[in-house]
Image: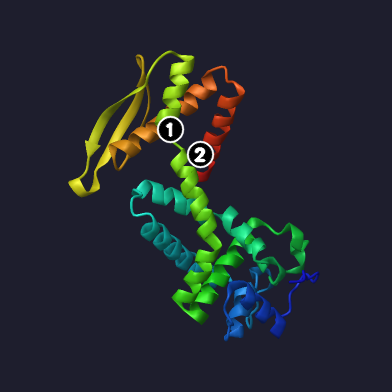
Amino acid sequence: MAKRDSSRAKFSASVIQDLGAAVGHAFTNHALVREALTHSSVKTDEQPSNERLEFFGDAVLGLAVTEMIFHEFPEFPEGEMTRIKSSLVSRETLAKKALEYGFDKFIVLGKGLGARADLPRSILSNVYEAIIAALYIDGGYDVCVTFIRKCFQPDLRALVSQQASRNYKSALQQLTQSHMSATPTYTVLSESGPDHDKRFTVAAVIGKRKFAAAEGPSKKEAEQSAALLALKVLLEELDLGEKDSALLIELEDDEDDES
């Protein structure tokens, strides 16, 4: 697909066809596509912007991604599912998907927004969600989910693999044994909630030092979260080697993803 140089895409038949080819659906409602691609900087009384569709698409995307995670990974607890979903539907990820599928070439922008190559992530992620809404309205849920799966299946598999490789309790134990000749233990500070919705508060303890407490829906998750908190503190305090410094950077990236 040839890249367009124009700063304002015209809604010709070829634009509709090219977008349809990208998402795997032949749109019948061209006005809906026009709305999905119109940024608020050029909104008029006759031509609404994509803000309402972006709102709708956010909900559709959230449901579809949640459904993917829930059905494909029945062993995952709520905390892991939430973490993975947040990463998949983040502004950064959606902006990348918009570029990957060439949606940036079709956005109708106001003249004051600068070069198309420098579009903010917010504009790219919003147009992605607006197109998801248009796909849902014009083609139905199954058509929409097919495209969403195509977009996110590789990312989902990669995240799950990455998640499985992270064991913060093991990492903390390796760090403390190599640098402090100590083995961490975990103490349950509190347990609350009914049987179907328990919450555990746990702290990591190394020697006589108790680290910040963490909460989770199971002892296992709470211990992992407590280990992560202790890891971040110790990696800052200790004289880090190259390997441990890399781990610290990864933990900081994890923290950014959760914010």
Foreground of the two, 48 or 74 = 74
Q: In the rendered view, would you say 52 is above or below 116?
A: below
Quarter of the picture holding the N terminus: bottom right
The kind of residue on which mark 2 rests is: Glu
* Residue linked to disc 2: 255
In percent of width and height, residue 121 lies at 64, 56
Does any portion of residue 48 appear in the rendered image?
no
Residue 30 position in % (x across, y down): 61, 84
Indicate whether 142 appears above or below 183: below
Camera-nearest residue between 51 and 69: 69
Question: Is 96 placed left or right of 81 in the picture?
Answer: right
Residue 29 at x, y = what percent?
57, 85
Q: Is residue 112 visible?
A: yes
Q: Tell me where residue 224 appears, x and y as whole percent.
A: 38, 34
Secondary structure state at the residue bearing disc 2: helix
Amino acid type, label 1 = Tyr
Q: Residues within 10 Å of mark 1 (few under 14, many from 20)?
A: some
Residue at the image point whose x is 50% and y is 39% from the top: 255
Q: Secondary structure at mark 1?
A: helix
Compared to 1, does 224 lie above or below? above
What residue appears at the point 53 percent right and 18 percent down from the top-left corner?
Answer: 238
Question: Label 1 belongs to which residue?
Answer: 168
Q: Quadrant of residue 186?
A: top left
Residue at 75% across, 73% down: 8
Which dot marks residue 251? none
Viewer-side residue, 206 vs 73:
73
Q: Is residue 199 left or right of residue 25?
A: left
Mark with earlier residue (2, 1): 1
Residue lying farthest right?
A: 5
Q: Is residue 150 shown left or right of residue 182? A: right
